[in-house]
Amino acid sequence: MRKPFIGGNWKMNTDGKNAVELAKGVAQGCAGVIDKVDVSVCPPFVYLSAVKQALGSSNIGLGAQNVYFEAKGAFTGEVSCQMLKDVGCKDVLIGHSERRHVIKETDALINKKLIAAIEASLLPIFCVGELLEERKAGKTEQVVKEQIQKGMAGISVEKAKAVTIAYEPVWAIGTGVNATPNQAQEVHLMIRQLIASMYNKDFAAQIRIQYGGSAKPDNAAELMTQPDIDGLLVGGASLKADDFTAIVKAAAPVKK
Ligand code: 13P
């Protein structure tokens, strides 16, 4: 059975005070359901330590939004896996669409980051998803497959067990237009079948696949009823403790 996993990606939002208040609100709000759902929040780098402290003993995971693959040295502005571990991170987002399309990260770079994160015992949330024009051109499957094959190249099944995949169609991110549950399910099933062909059926049945893109309290439960949607990666709605908590609660009863 796959335990639901809800992530909050705060992106480049909050300030020091607000980040701590938000973390405390999420910790309080999720207290009754944290044994049924895995929950992580991903604040900006500079607030990781403060958020870790604010989360206290809540069992809510701390995640970073990015990492660099090198261990240390002359890489101005970058942050290593060990640094993330040092401040208490469990998870790390890798290959988020904004890093692919705004910062121009390549599949090859994302692959190096995934390998480094797994080696450091971080749990990557590996993000994939197609652009609107790619969907319109009927290329969704091709794009997502290529991102996964290139991103996970050279990663053994044992190592891949650390990975959660997040399917985030770029046209649904921050637009208020979520993929319909059926649209998302179709891609999630394709991803699971791809993982079965790249690895094996047992592992494909275990790996968690989150959906991201305008997930909200009022669409979370329906998305989560889909057989291959195991969680949500939430952007905008993770910035309000009440909304994020409502999404976590909507995911709690779902068993697969
Ligand atoms: P929104 O929930 O704001 O659409 O963002 C989704 C996302 O990018 C999460 O990583």
Image (tube, rainbow, N blue to C red):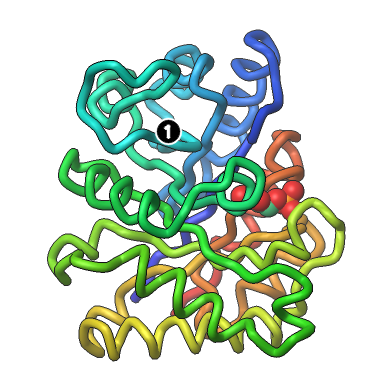
**Pointer 1 residue:** 62
Q: Is mark 1 within 8 Å of ligand 1?
A: no
Outermost residue to the right: 176
Snapshot quadrant of residue 236: top right
State the quadrant of the C terminus.
Answer: bottom left
Residue 25 appearing in the image? yes
* Amino acid found under the numbered disc labelled 1: Leu
Residue 99 image point, x, y percent:
57, 45
Q: Residue at x 56, y 25 (%)?
A: 44
Q: Is residue 244 left or right of residue 103?
A: right
User: 197 above or below 155?
Assistant: below
Q: Is residue 43 left or right of residue 179?
A: left
> 10 Å neighbourhood of mark 1: few (<14), some, or many (≥20)?
many
User: 155 above or below 190?
Assistant: above
Snapshot quadrant of residue 3: bottom left
Outermost residue to the top: 17
Residue 234 appearing in the image? no
Residue 137 image point, x, y percent:
74, 86
207, 139: nearer the viewer: 139
Q: Is residue 75 left or right of residue 125?
A: left
185, 147: nearer the viewer: 147
Residue 7 image point, x, y percent:
54, 48
241, 46: nearer the viewer: 46
Q: Residue at x 55, y 50 (%)?
A: 96
State the quadrant of the N terminus.
Answer: bottom left
Residue 185 image point, x, y percent:
60, 84
User: 118 above or below 23?
Assistant: below
Secondary element at image label 1: strand
User: 145 above or below 167?
Assistant: below
Q: Is residue 251 left or right of residue 37?
A: right
Q: Residue at x 53, y 64 (%)?
A: 128
